Image (spheres, rainbow, N blue to C red):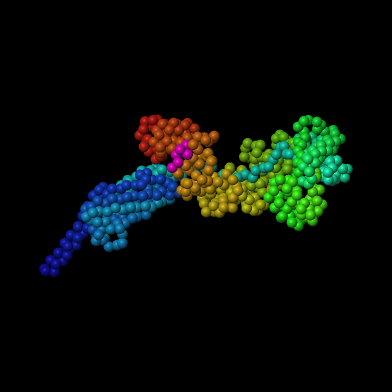
Amino acid sequence: MKRTKIKLLSYFAIAAVLLASCSGLDKMRTNAPDISYSLTPEVLEAHGGKVETNIRVQIPGSYFDPKATMEFTPVLVYEGGEKAYPTYTVQGEKASGNAQVISKLNGGQVNYTNSVEYDPAMRVSELEMRITASRGANSVTFPGIVIAEGVISTAASLDAESVQGKIGADNFQRVIPISKSADILYLIQQANVRGSELNKAEVKAINDFIKEVKEAENKEFKGANISAYASPDGPVNLNTRLAGQRESSAKTALSRQFSRSKVDDKDADFYDLKNTPEDWEGFKALMENSEIQDKDLILRVLSMHSDPEVREREIKNMSETFEVIAKEILPQLRRSKISVNAEEIGKSDEEIAELASNNPSELNVEEILYAATLEDSNKEKLAIYKKAAEVYPNDWRTHNNIGYVLYNDGNYKDAKVAFEKANSVKPNEPAVMNNLGALELQDGNIEKAEEYFGGAAGAGAELDNNLGVIAMKKGEYPQAVRYFGNSTSNNAALSRILNGDYQGAEATIQANADKDARSYYLNAIVGARTNNSEKVFANLRKAVELDGDNKKLAATDMEFAKYFEDVTFKSIVQ
């Protein structure tokens, strides 16, 4: 009888402990609404591919059971799924463990920061706090409480075609300047053109050039230049007279050849005539390239003195050196330089297009690359680039441009083959490195893309754009703004919005000559962030007018949360 009584007392004691345990947890669950939550920012935002949450949990005094442990788990709940943030644990003063301790008397504050990978479905979502409290072997799950709604996804809204490939540009010139030049040398203190000079190969080449241009249907003369010089020795007045006479004699000799070829050179603007009485610049250039003893001393004299008489006197004082100069340098300065200028007129667009279609081998590589730019459709461009690669397989641009068209068509697999072929023809060409990096970026391989972009220095605006896209994906908005520079693209405007430069963002949008629905949508976001409802409504109307899908987008975009119940806003998005 005594033993039974003791056993019953033990059962009652255990039951009392369990009831006390459960009543403590039940009390915490009942009073859970007394716990307060505040978020910074109040609405979650996606940045760098993640949704970070900063939650301050305030637990009131007289709430926490000293022997209890509580686990907080924020969970983003959205259509089709949910994503839990890492759990945070706190405990009472008498509970075992190493978690943050919450005072029974004073309560406590929990500062929680963590992130999850962003999913586009999270735009429309709820952040729910789920809590489980435990004491000993007992645990109680609290009803979930919604502490935030939606995710601002503006940072994740890069334009779909934001990653740019780079074409291998043609160097086609329809009008190509051509010219032929020669020097006529004179004896000291003379200005007559000697027969030996007229029979020099370079002068004969000018005569042949004149005949060639005259006879060609696609070439025409643009004039002639004559620059006559005297060497910087002797009196200035003598050299002035000699330079003028040499200019005249050179013109006469050249005009005679034009007449023989029946070219009219009588137009007042046909000849560009110049003369230099003392050619110190020519003297300096020849001295710098010579092996003459004391040349450094002579060059120093030129730098120290600007007066031509002083220069001449100082140089002549070096008697032995001056003898060499008089023999090797000065004769080359007694000259007239003549140049005949013309233009070669290339094929017309019609001729190039016809040959590209029917006889591409008749086009040079610049012409056939240019031919592709005359076509509107990617299909026609691709056909021409493929012909170009057949005719000119050793030009990296032909293969690169095949890849460029395929890339823009979304055929990344075949584009990669073409880019790799271009890279094999000319390894590490910046444009090709940019394009290989663009492919990796499209596949989400940011590190590999950066590796390629690192070898693409000099690829120009396309590379800067792509580096800006990477900075945006990483949430590095100041760097993105720098990379986009003066670009007026939607992504450039977006980078400024995310960097907090709303005035700069609007200026970028206004400067965009090709504004589309996205441009106006971004400007509506600028309006929302600057509390300018007129700007919000005006730009949303235009965005919806250009693309009806913006109705549904704006209706659930947390950028416009404060307008959700506004009559004007509803009239635009419904």
Locate residue 110 relative to residue 169 in the image: left or right: left
Question: Could you tell me if residue 454 is visible in this image?
Answer: yes
Question: What residue lies at 78% left-to-right and 53% top-to-bottom?
Answer: 322
Question: Could you tell me if residue 390 is visible in this image?
Answer: no
Question: What residue lies at 41% left-to-right and 38% top-to-bottom?
Answer: 529
Q: Nearer the viewer, residue 554 or 14?
A: 554
Quadrant that contains the C terminus:
top left
Residue 503, by quadrant, is top left
Image spot of residue 149 (x, y percent): 36, 43
Residue 502 covered by magenta stretch: yes
User: What is the magenta segment's predominant secondary structure?
Assistant: helix
Residue 237 vs 568, above or below: the answer is below
Q: Nearer the viewer, residue 573 or 223?
A: 223
Locate residue 398 relative to residue 513 in the image: left or right: right
Q: Which residues are magenta?
A: 500-506
User: Residue furthest toward the left?
Assistant: 1
Residue 177, by quadrant, is top right
